Image (tube, rainbow, N blue to C red):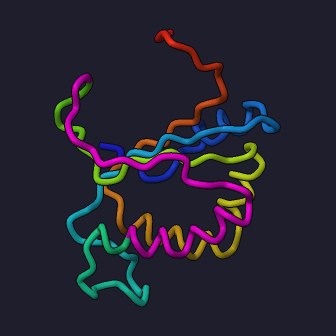
Amino acid sequence: MDAHIDPDRAQFEAFKALPRDTPLNMINLVRFREAAAYPEGHALAGKGLSGAEAYGNYGEGSAPVLAKVGGSILWRGAFETMLIGPAEEAWDACFIARYPNAGAFLAMVTDPDYQVAVVHRQAAVETSRLIRCGEATGGAAFG
């Protein structure tokens, strides 16, 4: 089973093919590993951190980079139940990150400080979903 921790080449190419000059929101759904899985040789490998603790390290290291590119956390919520969808999908972290444009997101993920921080995310995450959404007009009705 694919763990859905990092995008594969086709997913990343599809992201890059979309407009780069419009604001975007990234829906993040994350399930943590029980125990963090740092790569062999990493300073935190074998230190007994939980996935949640490792994800906290990711947040601490990535937040300044998110701010530097003009991004922010637009919304954060606590998962309660799956009303429609696979019952086995439960999430430890649910949030929407907003970026001024796709270039800002790409600048973030290629930033050297982010590259250091993302190791914590990879150690922390059992599975995740990252869904790019563009802007749409609001209204009183669904659809």
Q: Is residue 102 visible?
A: yes
Of residue 45 and residue 53, the one placed in the foreground of this image is 53
On screen, residue 135 versus residue 140, left or right, reads right
Q: Nearer the viewer, residue 14 or 27?
A: 27
Instruction: Report the front residue among 57 and 47.
Output: 57
Residues shaded magenta:
55-84
In the image, farthest residue toward the left = 87
Vertical side of 22 occupied by 33: above or below = below
Asked whether, in this view, residue 9 is left or right of residue 35, the answer is: right
User: Which residue corresponds to the image point at 42% horizontal and 87% vertical from the top-left?
Assistant: 41
The image quadrant of residue 36 is bottom left
* Total numbered labels placed on residues in the image: 0
* Identity of the residue drawn at 82% across and 37% down: 21
Across and down, in percent, residue 120 comes to 44, 72
Q: Residue at x 50, y 45 (%)?
A: 96
Point out residue 3 in the picture as x, y percentages from the top left corner: 35, 49
In what quadrant of the picture does the N terminus appear? top left
